[in-house]
Amino acid sequence: MHIHIFWDSLSPPGLQIPVTRQISSILGMAATVSENHVRMMGYVDGRKQIDAQVLLDSIQAYKHRHAMKDPLLLVVHQDLFKNGNSFVFGLARQSVGAAVVSTARLSNEYYGRGGNDDDLIDRITKEGAHEVGHLLGLDHCHDRECIMFKPDTLDELDRKKKVLCNICSERLEGYLSSD
Ligand SMILES: [Zn+2]
Ligand SMILES: [Zn+2]
């Protein structure tokens, strides 16, 4: 198995390689990154946000057309929402191995603080590894430092460490070896 990451051209440039390496190391699996080939869909003018479910439909269609079985994570710069949530950092559709992460709310600048590439790399890595973790079969975890903890705020995201807790790590090993 192999993680594919698509990076939309307006997402922060120059961070693809460190993010991809770190996601690969957290999940213990090869990962590659390339420019985005998925058609961007779901933008809602009135909200200036993308409906994450519609974008997942588009990723699903792309994967189907290309008979891609491996997990695919799309990183976009636009803000995401889903039905019932004013925003989401990311969203995964486990049944088809498709996930999306937005960088819109992950920069310090969004919160009026000074920009920092290391913070941004950390956050995209944590969000990306979290969503791909869902694609690999993992659910949310109560351990606030685990990658599979669901953060509602940037501070909760920052408090997480770039590792799976022992329980999630063992579960993942189990899923991967049963394939
Ligand atoms: Zn989650
Ligand atoms: Zn965990």
Image (tube, grey):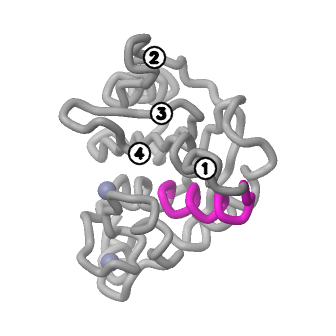
Q: Which residue appears farthest toward the right when viewing the image?
A: 14
Residue 54 against residue 99 in the figure, above or below = above
Q: Residue at x 72, y 50 (%)?
A: 16
Mark 4 → mark 1, Cα distance in angstroms: 22 Å
Which circle, 4 or 1, is nearer the viewer?
1
Left or right of 165 in this view: 67: right
Q: Is disc 2 surrounded by few (<14), some (14 to 19) or many (20+) residues within 10 Å? A: some
Residue 26 against residue 58 in the figure, above or below = below
- Circle number at residue 41: 2
Q: Which element is circle 1 on?
A: loop
Q: Quadrant of residue 108?
A: bottom right
Residue labelled with disc 1 = 112
Residue segment shown in magenta: 115-128
> Is the shortest distance between ligand 1 and the CB of mark 4 under 8 Å?
yes
Label located before the other in sequence (3 or 4): 3
What kind of secondary structure does the magenta stretch mostly adopt?
helix
Mark 1 → mark 2, Cα distance in angstroms: 29 Å
Q: Residue at x 62, y 56 (%)?
A: 31
Label located before the other in sequence (4 or 2): 2
Asked if the stretch drawn in magenta spans residue 32, the answer is no
Q: Which element is circle 2 on?
A: loop
Amino acid type of the residue tagged 3 in the rendering: Asp
Residue labelled with disc 4 = 90
Amino acid type of the residue tagged 1 in the rendering: Gly
| Ligand 2: quadrant of the figure | bottom left
- Circle number at residue 86: none
* Contact check, label 4 and label 1, Cβ < 8 Å: no
